[in-house]
Structures are given as structure tokens and as C-alpha cells.
Image (cartoon, helix red, strand yellow):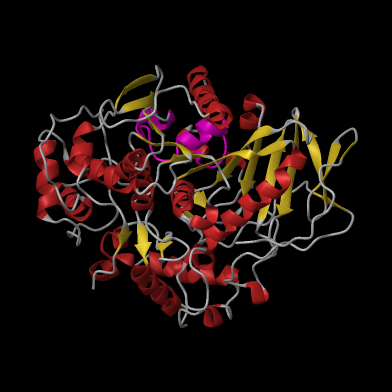
Amino acid sequence: MTRSVPPRTQGAVVTSAGASVVRTRAGAVRGRREDGLVVFRGIPFAEPPVGDARFAAPRPVAAWDGTRDAFAFGPPPPQESGFQGRTGVIDGPMGDDWLTVNVWTPDPDPAAHRPVMVWIYGGAYKLGHSGSPGYDARRIARDGDLIVVTLNYRLGVEGFARIDGAPANRGLLDQIAALEWVRENIAAFGGDPGRVTVFGESAGAGSIAALLAMPSAAGLFGRAIAQSVPGPFFSDELARDIAAAIAAEAGLRPTAADLSTVDPRQLTAAGETLGAKMRTFENRWGTVAHTLTAFSPVVDGDLLPSDPWQALAAGAARDVELIVGHTRDEYRLFAALGGRLGTITDEQATAALRTFGPAAVLGSRSESESESGSRSGSEPGSEPGPGSGADGERAYRTAFPDASPEELHEWVHSDALFRMPSLRLAEAQTAGGGRAHVYELAWAAPAYGGALGACHGLDVPLLFGTYGADLGLMLFAGVESSPEAEALSSRFRTAWTAFATTGDPGWPAYDIERRPTQVFDTDSVVTPYPHETSRRLWEHHAFGALPLTR
């Protein structure tokens, strides 16, 4: 995708006591000095995607005259009402200028050539905002002496619904447009466009996995960090069927023309309504009907030619250095949010094992791995889904003969949705001739006496040091920090920023013989991959684009 903003003089920096002015290709922006950094917020990287730009690929932002104040985050993209302990009512300005970036820089000196890290937020592809307090990047930029960029991208129906008359994966196209903005402008902020690292968690990690496989993203970054890669990617046929069901909730056809008649902020209601009854589509959508989102990157054969695991194994990203990993107790967050910790019956465990167990369980079994006391819950419903059926259940019960229903339920969800997709992405990268470093976060969140364990999303407040914001409020129970949390937080940032600067996070690259894995805990160590039994259960399962199962 090419961008045709007329070039202007870049890099001229005008400073005053509390502000700095940087000239981008589209015009000058004024940032503020804060805590030893200069911060620019709400810089548009594309035109607002409304009106005749609705459901279109992002368009280059129009140039402006004068100097634009970059003091406030841009408006959040339209999104559903809430998920994962976060609310959809975001504290942010109103407006249609959703596609903006924010920059934290130690010094906007064009001669500095500092490394650049670009954050892509998570939120099930239907929730998120770069202006959320939990993504305040000052500690990363300051500790690493580098530049951090955060960005907005379209979510839900606007960004990911597969509708007629619109390109697929518009949210990913927004991310590419933001990365093109970085390539064209970051030198003026003191950054090196040749040393860009993308990093993201959950849907942000899934987005990065997709970007690694997208030809249009090639060359925009040289390093990537994917934290908790989600397994679900949609086939084109499945995505179109889901989009038709969403549009039907609004009484419309799944076309850009029809959906454009509804205000973007009102259209989110159709996705919410469908989300509440996804289980009724399990015979058509398979395991997707048992998840928490109807949105995902779409393997459309064009923008995203193949799924990330297949693409990386074929060498699509062999020139990109990669960190990929997960938390130990990924699914426990969702169990807690559903109020189901300590309530799982054997029938519910059976349903989960039959729905989410690996479709093909072949090869020998290793001795059961040691799992720390896991207590989990489930999403509503106890009928077996259309997944692997009895084979998946039998495999898990044989591999973990002493596991409780709670543990089986949590482990199969964690494995299927995050742990094994993440590990297999590293293995695909290695098979394709690239380099990957694998990690696990095993430190338990301090809230509720540690009952949440090392759950999904815990790595975000640790990395950013934002214990009292967003999900950190739940996971740290209002405790601003502790010496143990601060030490682990510092280790995360040191590893991530060292990787962005040198390509070396501080532990060996993954290989299929030794399987070295950095385990972040009170005492962080490098060990062989710690979930060998799960790895063996899933080693013959092919992650890829999920089909329509009608």
C-alpha cells in the first residue's frame, strides 16, 4: 500500500521551556516535555475512516498548515461495551479522527537514530485504545533510552468484519499505515526507521502474527514481540458467515453500502448482540462459537495469503527476529471474569476437552508435567462442542490422570487459545529459517491471594509498570507496586528494550532439541519448555484458518 502525502521539510525542531515542535511530512506538531521525555499525542496517520472512506483502506492524512498541538490522545475507535475487565466507555475525546499515533521520545533530535518500539494493543479485536492509561509508555522509553509509538486501529465490524464491497482486515491495514507513518516520520522524532520493533499482547500479538505473514507489511519492522498469540484465525468463508450473522442483527445485508447507513458507534450493538448468543452457531462455526469474540484476522488469500504458522514455516519472516511467549495460567483471567473459579464440574470439563482438545493426538506421551495448583472456571454451557470430541478428552485425561476438573478445564483452554499457538509460532519461525526466543510468565498476580495466578494480560502492567490502571487495577488489587513486582517489571522492560536495541533479549534462541525458554518469576531462569506434556499432545495439530463447518 503506497501513501502519497506531499513531502515537507522534516526534522526541524523548535523548542521552548515546556514544548517541542517537530515537522512531519503532513505538518508540524507540538509535543510536551514530561518526566524527562517529549510526548506527542493524537497525531493523525490517516484520514478519519468515515463518510466515503467508511470500510475502505486507510487514506493518507491531508497536510495541514501551521503547528498542530499534540497534547491529547485521539478519539477511541468505536467498540463494544466491555470485555476482559475493561469497559467500552473509554475516557477520551469524541470525534471521528480515530487513526492516530502517540510518540514518547527522549529527545526529538533527528541525529539521535534511537531504536523504535511500536505497541499494538489487544482486546479481542473489538476493544482497545492507545490512550488507555495502562499503555503509558514513559517507563519503557525512559528505561530503554528509545522511542515508543502507540497507535489506534479500527475494531469490531469497522476493522475486521468480512463484508462485501470492502477490503478484508481493515484493522491490520490501519496498523500497516501507522507503520508506514513511522518509516516516513520517526527520524524527525529522533528514531531510526531501520530499527523498528513491533510488540503487542493478545489481539495485538495476533495482529503481529498476521503482519509477519502479510506481504504488504514486509520491511516495515525488523523485530517483533508477540505476547500471548491467540489461536483463532478465520477462513474467508467462516468470516463471511459471521459477518452475515452480525449484519442480520441490525436487519441489514453484510455489505459496505448497507452497514454504512448505521453510525459506527451504533453498529457496535450488532456485534454485542451476536456475541451473547454465539453458542447457537456452534454447528457452523465450531470452536469459535465457544470463544469470546466474533472477530479475528481473516485469511482471505490476498492481503493475508495464508495463516501465520504456515507462512512462517515457509520462511515468510525469516529476516525478522522474534520473541514469542505466553503466561502460565492464561485462561484463569476469563474464568475469574465469568465468576466461575472453583465451580467447574466434571461434565463441564468434559465439554471443554471435547471442544478444545487437539483434533489429532498422535505420537508418544511424556510424563505428566508439573502444574502448580490451578483453579479455573468455564464459559457458560456444558454440552460438548464440535471439536475433537472423545479423542481430545481421552488424550488429556490420559496425560494428566490426577488432574481435577478445574485443572483440565483451564489447561485445555489455555493450551488451545494461547499457549500452544504461541509456542507453535516460534517453532514455525525456526522451521522457516528464522530466529525466535520463547518465554513464559509464571509469576502470580498479587490480587486475591494469588488466586488468579499468572493469568492472561498480567504481562501488560508488568511491562509498562502501570499497576494501577486498566487490567492492573484488578490484577494488583489497587496495590501500586511492590519490590518483587518492580524487580520483575524491570526485567521485562530490560529484556524487551535490549531486544529492540541489539536483537538479544538475554537468553538463547529457541531450538527443537533443547527448547530453551525464559521463565519470568521471582527467580527468573532459563529452562526447557515447561509444558512438555501439552506440547506433545499438540505437536501434530495444525493451527490455521478455521473453517465454516456446515
Nearest the viewer among 413 and 220 is 220
Residue drawn where x is 38% and y is 58% of the image: 306
Residue 450 falls in which quadrant of the image? top left
In the picture, the quarter occupied by the C terminus is bottom left
The stretch of residues the image draws in magenta is 446-471
Nearest the viewer among 5 and 276 is 5
Nearest the viewer among 67 and 327 is 67
- Expressed as whole percent of the image width and height from the top left, the position of residue 95 reads 70, 63
- Expressed as whole percent of the image width and height from the top left, the position of residue 160 reads 48, 64
Residue 377 seen by the camera: no
Residue drawn where x is 27% and y is 28% of the image: 530
Nearest the viewer among 389 and 335 is 389
Q: Does the magenta stretch include residue 6?
A: no
Residue 494 seen by the camera: yes
- Left/right of residue 333 with respect to residue 410 in the rendered view: right
- Expressed as whole percent of the image width and height from the top left, the position of residue 509 reads 39, 28
- Expressed as whole percent of the image width and height from the top left, the position of residue 337 reads 39, 47
How many numbered circles are shown?
A: 0
Residue drawn where x is 70% and y is 37% of the image: 191
